[in-house]
Image: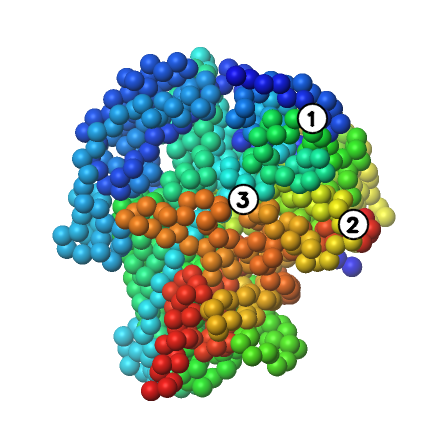
C-alpha cells in the first residue's frame, strides 16, 4: 500500500473540466467594457537608425485614440538580468535604432483591430539603413557591424566553467576527439499567442491580464518600465495556452497595452498575430559547438573541453542563462573529473534568442550524446557500456557547482537496455539510438535580484474544512495547479476536492518566480507543503490538548481524521477541530504560511532529474527521409506526484524534441525569417508521432516535496541526440548539424558511397 | 454593407447582421460570445477553431459567416448535455488528453465529427481525423487513446 493518500494517484487536472468544455478563459478570450484594441508597428529593416517618426496622419484616422512611440516612454530599457544593468538592453519601443526585422517602433490604440491596423500604415518612419550582421561567427570578427554601440566584437555575455586540470588530463588520455556541431533554432509556437489586456484606472492603478509564465516578473518589470510602484501593478494570469520559455520576459503586448491604457485610462488589448509570434518574440538559441573529448582505452572519460558561440540576436533576454546552462549540461550526466567550458553569446541583427524548453540543455545533450557514441565506436566499446562506466551516481558533487542527491541514471540505463534487447534484430535501414539526459528542478541563480523567497504559499482553512490555497505559481498547461493542490491535500490530510487553488494573481497571491526551468513542483511544492504543515500544526496543537496525548506521541491527519500516529483509532474529526480551532482563535481563520528558497545546493539547482531514451528510426535511403518509429524512455523524476500529468509531459516533450531533431527550423534570408506561419513551420503532427513507452524508475529526492523533482522539460534534451545516433546505426551516416533534414541525410549517404567506392 | 445571417448554433437559432468579410469564427467568438472556440493561426492550418457545420468538421477561420447561412453549427459549448459531459470529454479528462487546453475545443470537435461519421475507426483513421489539429503540448498519443476508448464504447 502506498504511504501516500493523494500523491501518486492518476488524477485529471483540477482545471480539466473547464478545459474540455470550452469554459476555461484565457486572456485571449477577454473583453472589457469600453475596451480598445492595440497594434504594433515594426521595423522592416534588420539594422537602421530612426531619423524621424511622423504619427500625425495615423492620429487623424477616425477611431484611432492614441499613437505612441519611444518619446512617450520613460526611455528605460528592460532586461530580466536585473543585477546587471548593462544586460538590460531592450527598449521595446525603439528610440534611435532598430536592431532586427520586427523591432517595435510605435503602437496604436483604436476602436477595433482593423482601424488599428490601418493606422499602422499611416505612420511614417524615416530610417537610415545600417550594415547588418546575422551570423555570430561573422559578428565576432574585427570590423563587423556593431549591433549595440560600444559592445566589443558584439560579445554580449561570456561564461566560463572549469574544474580539475583539463590540460594535464588530456595528456593522460589514450584517445582524444575534436568535433564540431551546429544546433539550430526553434520556435515556441504556443497555440495561444502572446496577448494582454491592460486596464489603468483614474485611481492610478494598473491591472493586467496576460498570457505569461510569471505574473511576478511581469509585475516587477512593468512597474520598472512604466515608473509605477510594484504594488500599483496587479498582474493576473488566467489560463495560458503554452509557454515553453517564450512567455517569461516582459513582452510588447504587456508593455504597449499598459502604456496605451495609462495614456487613455481605458482598457486596451493587444494580441500578436501568428507572423509576429514567429518573427518578433523570442526563440531557441542557435549554437556553434566545438568539443574536445578525451578518454582512456577502457572508456573512462578523463577530460572535456567545450567552446560555444551562440547567436544572441538583438537582445540579452534569458539568453545569458541559456549560455550558462548549455555549458553546465555539457558535463552531464557523466563524471568528468576535468572539465572546461567557454561560452560566448554574440549579438546579431536577428530575432532575439532566449530560453526554450530545456534552456540550452537540448543543444548540449545533442552534442554530448552524439560525440559519446563516436568516442565509443573509436574505442570499440558498446555505447551503453561507456554510459554505464561514466554515468553519475547518487550523492555526487561537482565542486562549487552542484550537489546531486538522488540519481537513478543507472537504473534507467538498465531498463532501457532490457527494452532494446527485447526488440531483437532490426529490419534493414532501421536503427536504435540512445541518449542520456539530466535536468534541473528550478534554478538557483538569482539574476533577477528578487528580494522575496523564490516560492511562497498561503493555506487558509474555512469553517467547513474547505481549504483555499494561494500561490504565485503559474500553471501554463503543465499542470502545476493540480500538483500543488495534491501536495497541499496530502500534507494536510484532506482530500483533493477539499482544495481550491488561487494562483498567479499578484494582487492576492504571495510571490513566486514563475514557471521556468521546471521549478514549480519542487520549489513551489516545498512552499505549499510548508504552508499546509503550518496550518496543520495549528490544528494538531488543539487536538493534542483535547486528546490529552502523552508527550511521546505524535499526531497526524489522514483522510480528514486527526489521530495518534501508530494508533489511528484514537483521534478526532478534522471538521470538529477546524471549527473549534477557529473559535479558539477569537474567530480568526486557520492560516498557514510557507516559503522556500534553495540554499547550500551549489549554484545551479537544488535537484536533478535523470533519464535515458532510446529511439528507433527508419531511414529511407532513396529520399533521406527519417521516420521516428518508437521512443522508449526511462526517467527518474523522484516521487511522481501525478503520474497522468507526468506521462503527458514526457510524451509531449518527445513531440517537441523530435521536431527539434528533424523538422522544425527557422531559415532566414538577411535576417528575415522565411517561414513565419504554422503552415510553413513544420511540427510533428498526430501521424508523425512515434509509439511511446515510459518506464518509471523509483527514487526519492530529499530536497523535493515528498521526494519529487523535475519532470517533463528535461525530456526535451535527449531526443535529437538519440535520433542522430539511431540514424548512424541505421545507415552509417553521422549528421552533426540540426535539424536532420532529408537533404542532409541524402548528401551524407552520397558522400559515404563516394568514399566507399574510392 | 451588412447582410442578414441566420444560424443555428448548439440548437439555438440566431438572426444576425454581418459584413460579407466576417468569418464564422468571428461571429462565434465575438458576436455570440462563445469563446470556447479558439483561433490559433488565422490561416486554416492549426485547427484550434474547428467547429461542426452541418455535420462536417470545418475550420471556422476559413469559412465566411455568410457561407454558413441557414446552417447548423455545433461548438464546444454544445458538447455537454446540461451538466453531463459528452463521453469524449470524459475520456479527455481520464486520459490526460489536454494540457494547456487551447487546442482542446477544436480537437474535441474534430473527434466528434470523426466518430459521428465512422463510429469504429482504426487507430490510423483516428490519427488522420485529428491530423488537421495541432497540439503543441501532449504529443497526441493520449488524445488517440482517449478517442479509441470512446470508439470502443468503454466510456
Q: Is residue B13 left or right of residue A724?
A: right
Q: Earlier in the sequence, mark 2 or mark 1?
A: 1
Judge whether B62 appears above or below A298 on screen.
Answer: above
Q: Position of residue A454 (x, y in %)?
A: 48, 42
| Disc number placed over residue B70 in the picture, else none | 1
Q: Earlier in the sequence, mark 3 or mark 1?
A: 3
Numbered disc 1: secondary structure: loop
Q: Earlier in the sequence, mark 3 or mark 2?
A: 3
Circles 3 and 2: CB atoms closer than 8 Å: no
User: Seen from this angle, which residue lies furthest left?
Assistant: A143
Residue closest to the eye, B119 or A637: B119
Residue at 30% x, 50% y is A669
Q: Quadrant of residue A701?
A: bottom right
Residue at 29% x, 44% y is A314
| Disc number placed over residue B119 in the picture, else none | 2
Bin the neighbour count of mark 3 within 10 Å (Cα to Cα): few under 14, some 14-19, many 20 and up: some
Judge whether B124 appears above or below B24 on screen.
Answer: below
Residue closest to the eye, A307 or A664: A664
Q: Chain of mark 2?
A: B
Q: How is the image coloured?
A: rainbow
| Disc number placed over residue B45 in the picture, else none | 3
Have a look at marks 3 and 1 and say if they share a chain. yes
Numbered disc 2: secondary structure: loop
Amino acid at each position: 500500500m502506498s504511504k501516500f493518500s493523494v500523491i501518486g494517484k492518476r488524477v485529471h487536472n483540477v482545471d480539466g473540466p473547464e478545459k474540455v468544455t470550452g469554459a476555461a478563459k484565457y486572456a485571449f478570450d477577454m473583453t472589457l467594457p469600453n475596451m480598445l484594441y492595440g497594434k504594433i508597428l515594426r521595423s522592416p529593416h534588420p539594422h537602421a537608425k530612426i531619423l524621424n517618426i511622423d504619427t500625425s496622419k495615423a492620429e487623424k484616422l477616425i477611431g484611432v485614440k492614441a499613437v505612441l512611440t519611444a518619446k512617450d516612454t520613460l526611455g528605460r530599457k528592460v532586461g530580466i538580468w536585473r543585477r546587471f544593468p548593462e544586460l538590460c538592453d531592450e527598449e521595446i519601443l525603439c528610440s534611435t535604432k532598430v536592431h532586427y526585422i520586427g523591432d517595435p517602433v510605435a503602437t496604436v490604440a483604436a476602436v477595433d483591430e482593423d482601424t488599428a491596423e490601418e493606422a499602422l500604415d499611416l505612420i511614417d518612419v524615416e530610417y537610415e539603413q545600417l550594415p547588418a550582421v546575422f551570423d555570430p561567427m561573422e559578428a565576432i570578427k574585427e570590423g563587423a557591424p556593431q549591433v549595440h554601440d560600444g559592445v566589443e566584437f558584439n560579445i554580449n555575455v561570456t561564461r566560463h566553467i572549469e574544474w580539475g586540470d583539463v590540460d594535464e588530463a588530456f595528456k593522460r588520455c589514450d584517445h582524444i576527439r575534436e568535433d564540431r556541431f551546429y544546433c539550430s533554432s526553434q520556435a515556441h509556437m504556443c497555440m495561444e499567442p502572446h496577448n494582454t489586456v491592460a486596464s489603468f484606472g483614474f485611481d492610478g492603478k494598473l491591472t493586467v491580464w496576460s498570457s505569461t509564465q510569471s505574473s511576478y516578473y511581469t509585475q516587477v518589470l512593468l512597474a520598472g518600465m512604466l515608473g509605477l510602484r510594484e504594488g500599483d501593478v496587479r498582474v493576473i494570469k488566467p489560463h495560458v495556452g503554452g509557454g515553453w520559455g517564450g512567455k517569461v520576459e516582459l513582452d510588447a503586448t504587456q508593455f504597449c497595452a499598459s502604456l496605451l491604457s495609462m495614456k487613455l485610462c481605458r482598457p486596451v488589448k493587444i494580441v500578436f498575430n501568428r507572423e509576429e509570434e514567429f518573427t518578433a518574440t523570442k526563440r531557441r538559441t542557435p549554437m556553434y559547438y566545438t568539443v574536445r573529448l578525451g578518454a582512456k582505452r577502457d572508456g573512462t572519460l578523463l577530460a572535456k573541453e567545450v567552446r560555444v558561440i551562440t547567436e544572441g540576436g538583438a537582445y540579452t533576454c534569458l539568453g545569458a542563462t541559456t549560455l550558462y546552462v548549455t555549458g553546465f549540461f555539457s558535463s552531464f550526466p557523466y563524471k568528468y573529473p576535468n572539465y572546461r567550458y567557454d561560452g560566448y553569446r554574440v549579438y546579431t541583427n536577428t530575432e532575439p534568442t532566449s530560453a526554450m524548453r530545456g534552456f540550452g540543455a537540448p543543444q548540449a545533450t545533442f552534442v554530448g550524446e552524439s560525440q559519446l557514441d563516436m568516442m565509443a565506436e573509436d574505442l570499440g566499446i558498446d555505447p551503453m557500456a561507456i554510459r554505464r562506466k561514466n554515468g553519475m551516481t547518487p550523492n555526487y558533487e561537482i565542486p562549487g557547482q552542484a550537489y546531486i542527491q538522488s540519481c537513478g541514471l543507472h537504473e534507467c540505463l538498465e531498463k532501457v537496455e532490457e527494452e532494446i534487447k527485447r526488440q531483437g534484430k532490426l529490419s534493414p535501414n532501421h536503427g536504435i539510438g540512445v541518449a542520456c539526459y539530466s535536468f534541473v528542478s528550478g534554478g538557483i541563480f538569482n539574476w533577477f535580484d528578487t528580494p522575496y523567497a523564490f516560492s511562497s504559499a498561503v493555506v487558509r482553512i474555512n469553517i467547513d474544512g474547505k481549504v483555499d490555497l494561494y500561490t504565485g505559481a503559474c500553471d501554463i498547461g503543465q499542470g502545476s495547479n493540480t500538483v500543488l493542490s495534491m501536495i497541499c491535500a496530502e500534507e494536510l490530510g484532506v482530500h483533493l476536492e477539499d482544495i481550491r487553488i488561487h494562483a498567479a494573481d499578484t494582487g492576492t497571491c504571495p510571490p513566486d518566480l514563475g514557471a521556468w526551468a521546471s521549478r514549480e513542483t519542487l520549489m513551489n511544492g516545498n512552499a505549499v507543503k510548508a504552508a499546509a504543515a503550518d496550518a496543520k500544526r495549528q490544528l494538531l496543537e488543539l487536538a493534542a490538548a483535547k486528546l490529552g496525548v502523552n508527550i511521546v506521541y505524535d499526531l497526524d491527519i489522514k483522510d480528514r481524521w486527526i489521530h495518534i500516529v501508530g494508533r489511528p483509532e484514537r483521534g478526532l474529526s478534522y471538521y470538529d477541530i477546524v471549527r473549534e480551532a477557529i473559535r479558539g482563535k477569537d474567530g480568526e481563520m486557520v492560516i498557514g504560511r510557507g516559503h522556500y528558497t534553495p540554499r547550500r545546493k551549489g549554484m545551479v539547482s537544488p535537484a536533478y532529474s535523470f533519464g535515458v531514451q532510446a529511439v528507433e528510426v527508419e531511414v529511407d535511403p532513396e529520399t533521406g527521409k527519417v521516420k521516428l518509429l518508437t521512443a522508449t524512455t526511462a526517467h527518474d523524476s523522484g516521487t511522481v506526484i501525478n503520474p497522468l500529468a507526468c506521462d503527458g509531459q514526457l510524451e509531449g516533450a518527445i513531440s517537441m524534441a523530435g521536431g527539434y531533431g528533424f523538422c522544425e527550423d527557422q531559415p532566414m534570408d538577411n535576417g528575415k525569417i522565411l517561414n513565419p506561419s504554422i503552415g510553413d513551420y513544420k511540427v510533428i503532427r498526430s501521424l508523425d508521432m512515434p509509439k511511446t513507452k515510459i518506464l518509471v524508475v523509483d527514487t526519492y529526492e530529499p530536497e523535493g516535496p515528498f521526494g519529487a523533482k523535475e519532470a517533463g522539460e528535461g525530456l526535451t534534451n535527449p531526443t535529437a541526440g538519440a535520433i542522430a545516433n539511431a540514424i548512424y546505426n541505421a545507415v552509417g551516416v553521422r549528421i552533426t548539424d540540426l535539424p536532420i533534414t532529408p537533404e542532409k541525410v541524402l548528401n551524407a549517404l552520397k558522400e559515404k558511397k563516394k568514399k566507399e567506392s574510392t | 454593407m451588412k447582410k442578414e445571417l441566420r444560424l443555428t448554433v448548439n440548437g439555438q437559432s440566431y438572426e444576425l447582421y454581418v459584413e460579407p468579410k466576417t468569418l464564422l469564427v468571428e461571429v462565434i467568438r465575438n458576436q455570440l460570445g462563445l469563446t470556447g472556440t479558439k483561433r490559433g493561426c488565422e490561416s486554416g492550418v492549426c485547427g484550434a477553431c474547428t467547429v461542426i457545420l452541418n455535420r462536417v468538421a470545418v475550420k471556422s477561420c476559413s469559412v465566411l459567416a455568410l457561407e454558413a447561412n441557414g446552417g447548423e453549427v455545433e461548438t464546444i459549448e454544445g458538447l455537454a448535455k446540461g451538466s453531463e459531459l459528452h463521453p469524449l470529454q470524459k475520456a479527455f479528462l481520464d486520459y490526460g488528453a489536454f494540457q494547456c487546453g487551447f487546442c482542446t475545443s477544436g480537437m474535441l470537435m474534430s473527434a466528434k465529427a470523426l466518430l459521428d461519421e465512422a463510429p469504429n475507426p482504426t487507430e490510423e483513421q483516428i490519427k488522420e481525423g485529428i491530423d488537421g489539429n495541432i497540439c503543441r503540448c501532449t504529443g497526441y498519443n493520449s488524445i488517440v487513446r482517449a478517442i479509441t476508448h470512446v470508439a470502443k464504447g468503454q466510456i
